[in-house]
Image: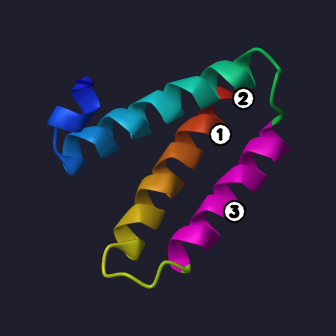
Amino acid sequence: MSIHITKGAQENAIAAALLVKHLGKLLISTGVVTSSEAARVVRAAEAEAASLGTASAPAIAEVIREIGLEWKQTE
């Protein structure tokens, strides 16, 4: 059984956010992804979060914005 199946949603979400944050930093710092491309990804993810229509959508958008800010600092 995979470890992610035995953990809760919060643990999985935090792990995913950390992986995305560090992967994004790596891709930007090595020039694989430009800062404008990263900004487009953040805007698209924020828009998708807003369209979810759930009570947690604002919190999801906030996490996305925070990751985007960390990516921007990588430039």
Kind of residue at disc 1: Lys
* Residue 54 lies within the magenta run: no
Kind of residue at disc 2: Glu
**Within 10 Å of the Cα at label 2, are there few (<14), some (14-19), or many (20+) other Cα atoms?**
few
SS label for mark 3: helix
Which residue in the structure is indicated by mark 2?
A: 75
Residue at 61 percent of width and 36 percent of height = 71
Q: Estimate the spatial distance between the alpha carbons at disc 1 and disc 2, rounded to whole Å.
A: 6 Å
Q: Nearer the viewer, mark 3 or mark 2?
A: 3
N-terminal label among 3 and 1: 3
* Residue 37 lies within the magenta run: yes
Kind of residue at disc 3: Ala
Q: Position of residue 46 (x, y in %)?
A: 58, 66
Q: Estimate the spatial distance between the alpha carbons at disc 3 and disc 1, rounded to whole Å.
A: 16 Å
- Decide whether the magenta segment is chiefly helix, strand or loop: helix
Q: Compared to 60, does 34 lie above or below?
A: above
Q: Compared to 25, does 6 lie above or below?
A: below
SS label for mark 1: helix
Q: Position of residue 57 (x, y in %)?
A: 40, 74
Q: Farthest residue to the top: give it.
A: 30
Q: Looking at the image, do the residues carrying marks 3 and 2 touch, with CB atoms under 8 Å apart?
A: no
Q: Farthest residue to the front: give it.
A: 1
Residue at 53 percent of width and 77 percent of height = 50
Question: What is the magenta range?
Answer: 35-50
Which residue in the structure is indicated by mark 3?
A: 44
Which residue in the structure is indicated by mark 1?
A: 72
Q: Looking at the image, do the residues carrying marks 1 and 2 touch, with CB atoms under 8 Å apart?
A: yes
Query: Quick one: 14 or 12, which is closer to the camera?
Result: 12
Q: Nearer the viewer, mark 3 or mark 1?
A: 3
